[in-house]
Image: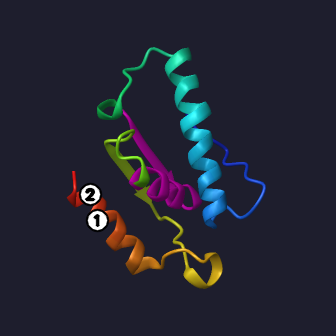
Amino acid sequence: MISDANLAGSAFGEAGLKVFERELKEAIIPFVEKSYRVKAGAGNRALAGLSMSGIHTLYTGSKNTDLFSYLGVFSSGWSVPAQTGGPGDFDYFHITNTIADKK
């Protein structure tokens, strides 16, 4: 299933990332599980993205490890503090690795 990430604001700011996360959790996953024969649960679910969708994958996947066991991030955009007020590359890398270490 591919979301078009049709966001009203900046897709790279945290507000846009939260909109994508909410749409995925509240609309897309329930729709797919209701409409198709799929195995539910994190062990059977992956999230992947290229470019802008890569930052969506990093943000949503690292915050929802209970929903996704596998993340594929390809040529992702990165959150830059001066542009978004969010964590920088190194900080984000550290956050996501810390989460992974806790698994």
Tell me the quarter of the picture where residue 101 sits: bottom left
Q: Amino acid at mark 2?
A: Ala
Residue at x 37%, y 41% (from the top left corner): 68
Q: Residues within 10 Å of mark 2 (few under 14, many from 20)?
A: few
- Residue 58's disc is none
* Residue 87 as seen in the image, left or right of residue 11: left
Q: Is residue 28 above or below residue 72?
A: above
- Along the viewing direction, whichever of 1 and 94 lies nearer the viewer: 94
Residue 14 placed where, x, y %? Answer: 60, 64
Residue 98 placed where, x, y %? Answer: 27, 65
Residue at x 42%, y 53% (from the top left corner): 63
Tell me the quarter of the picture where residue 46 sits: top left
Q: Secondary structure at mark 2?
A: helix
Q: Amino acid at mark 1?
A: Asn
- The type of colouring in the image is rainbow
Whether residue 58 is in magenta: the answer is yes
Check the picture and name the quadrant holding the N terminus: top right
Residue 90 placed where, x, y %? Answer: 38, 80
Residue at x 42%, y 57% (from the top left corner): 73
Give yes or no for contact between labels 2 and 1 (Cβ–Cβ under 8 Å): yes
Residue at x 66%, y 48% (from the top left corner): 5
Q: Secondary structure at mark 1?
A: helix
- Residue 100's disc is 2
Q: Which residue is mark 1?
A: 97
Q: CA distance from mark 2 to mark 1?
A: 5 Å
Whether residue 29 is in magenta: the answer is no
Residue 39 placed where, x, y %? Answer: 36, 21
Q: Is residue 77 above or below residue 65?
A: below
The stretch in magenta equals 45-62
Chief secondary structure of the magenta span?
A: helix
